[in-house]
Amino acid sequence: MRVGFFAIFLASVALLVSAAPLPKDAIGPHVQAHARHQALADHHLERAEHHEELANTHLNHSTAAAASGHNALAAEHNGKYEHHMERMNYHMERHEHHQAIADLHAAHIPRRSIDELD
């Protein structure tokens, strides 16, 4: 009777343990998603900065052309300025989107302090 009880008990414990997810398995998708979204956030931030630099260059050229009386050239540079500002805004929105998702996944990744390692 005792042997049968322990056999059933051990079988049920083994079944429960095998069905429980390992902590690493639960964390793994968050680590991967965090890395992917952080990389995308960084990419979009870099592109936004690039477009901002180009926009400022075209704004300076537009201002200089207008001061020299080259209105057609000033209008052309102003159009390019507006284009790069639109692209900058797009990339900033995408950066904020991906950064928020990366931060959300990062919150699910446990961090260990240096004190815990001792």
Image (cartoon, rainbow, N blue to C red):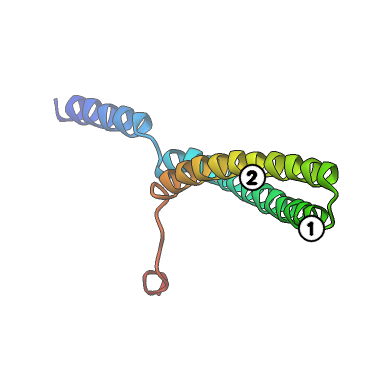
Image position of 7 (left or right of 97) = left
Q: In this rendering, which labeled residue sits more in front, label 1 or label 2?
A: 1
The residue closer to the viewer here, 45 or 81, is 81
User: Quarter holding the N terminus?
Assistant: top left
Q: Tell me the kind of residue under disc 2.
A: Met
Q: Is residue 64 above or below residue 76?
A: below
- Residue 20 position in % (x across, y down): 34, 33
Give the structural element (helix, strand or loop) at label 2. helix
Image position of 65 (left or right of 102) = right
Which residue has dot 2 on it?
88
- Residue 4 position in % (x across, y down): 20, 24
Which residue has dot 1 on it?
67
Give the structural element (helix, strand or loop) at label 1. helix
What separation in Å lies between label 1 and label 2 (alpha carbons)? 26 Å
The residue closer to the viewer here, 24 or 31, is 31
Residue 28 can be seen in this image? no
- Residue 14 position in % (x across, y down): 32, 31
The quadrant holding residue 73 is top right
Q: Is residue 116 above or below residue 6?
A: below
Q: Tell me the kind of residue under disc 1.
A: Ala
The residue closer to the viewer here, 84 or 59, is 59
Q: Residue at x 37, y 69 (%)?
A: 116
Label 1 Cα neighbours within 10 Å, binned few <14 / some 14-19 / many ≥20: few
Q: Residue at x 29, y 27 (%)?
A: 11
Q: Residue at x 50, y 46 (%)?
A: 99
Image position of 54 (left or right of 100) = right
Which callout, 1 or 2, points at the residue further toward the start of the chain?
A: 1
Marks 1/2 in contact by CB < 8 Å: the verdict is no
Image position of 46 (left or right of 74) = left
Residue 35 can be seen in this image? yes
Q: Residue at x 50, y 45 (%)?
A: 96
